[in-house]
Image: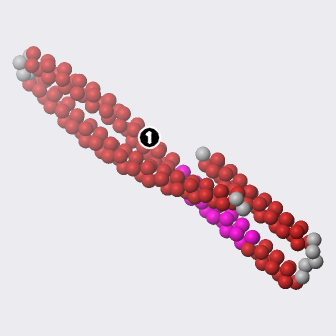
Amino acid sequence: MANRWVLSAIGIAAVATVGLATGLSAKTQFQRQAPATLDDLLSEVKGLRADIGQSSAATIKTQLLVARLQVEEQRINGIAKQIADVDQQLAPVRQSMAMMTADMKRLDEARRSTNNDPDLAERIDQIKSGLDNQQRRERELAGQEANLAQQYAVEQSCWSDFNDRLDVLERSLTTR
């Protein structure tokens, strides 16, 4: 995706340069048909300076937007990786919780059928403690995931803003 936007930005700069060169060439050829006075030459030089200034400003603006776009893409990719890491941590926690819950139910049924076996009650308490720890860990990870998802949305919005600005710049350069 980054390469596409870099190539797009380079294309924008190339279009601007070709458009400027074409416009300058046409101006110069038109004015060569009649003898030029010193005032004509001076106004032509001023016009060329203004055109070059506009072209330079557009090129710099394009380069800045592309750089910002790349930084946003790096941020988005970093946050996406963090979300994937949290998901990888959540999976075994949830799997462990499911196994502990099933073990606790099985042991509770066995305890009821053996008339409150103290060993089973102790084992159930251990499982409950482990389950509480896993639930706490799950809440922590789910909170991290929610925060990361919010950051991801903010960075995605910034990326879209820079992308829209590049589109506007591209349209302004192609209409000249």
Q: Which residue is mark 1?
A: 84
Query: 62 above or below 105?
Result: below
Displayed quadrant of residue 12: bottom right
Query: 11 above or below 30?
Result: above
**Residue sitting at x 71%, y 53%:** 11
98 sits to left or right of 26: left
Q: Amino acid at mark 1?
A: Ala
Q: Which residues are magenta?
A: 51-73
Residue 173 x/y as whole percent: 69, 60
Q: Secondary structure at mark 1?
A: helix
**Residue sitting at x 30%, y 30%:** 96
Query: 172 above or below 5?
Result: below
Residue 72 appears in view: no
Q: Does the magenta segment cover residue 63? A: yes
Displayed quadrant of residue 126: top left
**Residue sitting at x 82%, y 76%:** 44
